[in-house]
Structures are given as C-alpha cells and as structure tokens.
Image (cartoon, rainbow, N blue to C red):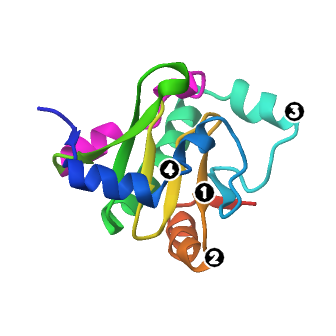
Amino acid sequence: MRNFKNVSLTKQKALSEAFPELLNFYVCTEVADYKQVSVSVFDHWLSQEEAIKRIDNSSSIQCDNNNELLHKFIISLAQSTETYVVKLRGRNTDKKATFREFTSHCGMVNSLIPKHHFSADTHRFVLVLPQLNLVYFESSDFTHHIYFKREEDLESVSKLANENGLSIIK
C-alpha cells in the first residue's frame, strides 16, 4: 500500500498559492516574509570539533537514538495539524512542487523516518503545514529546518520539540 497519494487538483492549486515561494527554500534563497529556525538533538550549533565528535564519530546506537527523537517529534507535529508531503516534479528550471497526503497513520510513520545523516538531501522529506503556515525540511546531522512567518505559529512547534527532548536553534 502506498504511504501517500496526490491531493486533488483544487487542493494542489490552493497549496501552491499558499506557498508560492516553496522552491526558493530548496536552493537556500532567503524569502522576505519567512524566518528560519532549526530543531535539533543538540542545544546549540556545533563547532567543527564538536561535529566530528558528536556526529561523525557517533555510534550506530547514538545515531538511532537521535533519529528516534526527531521521528517522534515530526510524527507528533504531523498528527497535530494538516500536513502534506512535498515532491518536486520536472527538471532543472522547469521544476514545480506537488503535494501529497498520507494514506494512513502507518504511511505517515513510515514516510517520516529520518534518513541516515550521510544520505543526500534529495532523498529527505519536505512537509508543508498550512494551518501553521510553515515549511519543514528534513536535513542531515540530526537537525531539521523550519521556515515560518509568524512567531505565534512557532510556539506550538517549540513546545512539541521540548516535550520530545529536542531544542530549537535560531
């Protein structure tokens, strides 16, 4: 069974209009109305020495524990509000974002498992949460990125992060 399916054309259009700047986030372009924070297993940005010690030289058990914390958090967040998976279609300059909805709770859980920190970013999930007006990017090094417009939208996310043993890094 599939983990997610395309949303209707009407919903595709509505989400595209709600997030017209979505492709800019993929190329790390600043978008005027959005701010960015990161949710991480670490409570601060790591120095190069810290990163080598706490990421590159971490045991497989520690990697699994870090990914489990992030997984529990994103599942909690996705269950708390309307959530869609973003997939890019097209090549080079003709890319466009398409939106998918989860087919079941099991599909959501399976789709949102964080990839190994050495995996390429192109294989990681991206979500939009329209009710909170935010975009969520899975990233490497046990840190994910959130783009948001209003501070009040981030409050519930920060609370969930803390409840799941994670930190918000600005």
- Residue at numbered disc 2: 151
What is the magenta range? Answer: 105-123
Residue 138 among magenta residues: no
Q: Is residue 130 left or right of residue 163?
A: left
On-image quarter of the C terminus:
bottom right
Mark 4: amino acid: Leu
Q: Residue at x 42, y 57 (%)?
A: 17
Mark 2 / mark 4, whichever is N-terminal: 4
* Classed neighbour count for the residue bearing mark 3: other residues with Cα under 10 Å, few (<14), some (14–19), many (≥20): few
Mark 2: amino acid: Glu
Mark 4 / mark 3, whichever is N-terminal: 3
Q: In the picture shown, does residue 68 fall above or below 81?
A: above
Q: CA distance from mark 4 to mark 1?
A: 20 Å
Q: CA distance from mark 2 to mark 4?
A: 24 Å
Residue situated furthest left in the rendering: 1
Q: Residue at x 48, y 66 (%)?
A: 133
Whether residues under marks 2 and 4 lie with C-beta atoms below 8 angstroms apart, the answer is: no
Q: Is residue 54 visible?
A: yes
Q: CA distance from mark 4 to mark 3?
A: 23 Å
The kind of secondary structure element at disc 4 is: helix
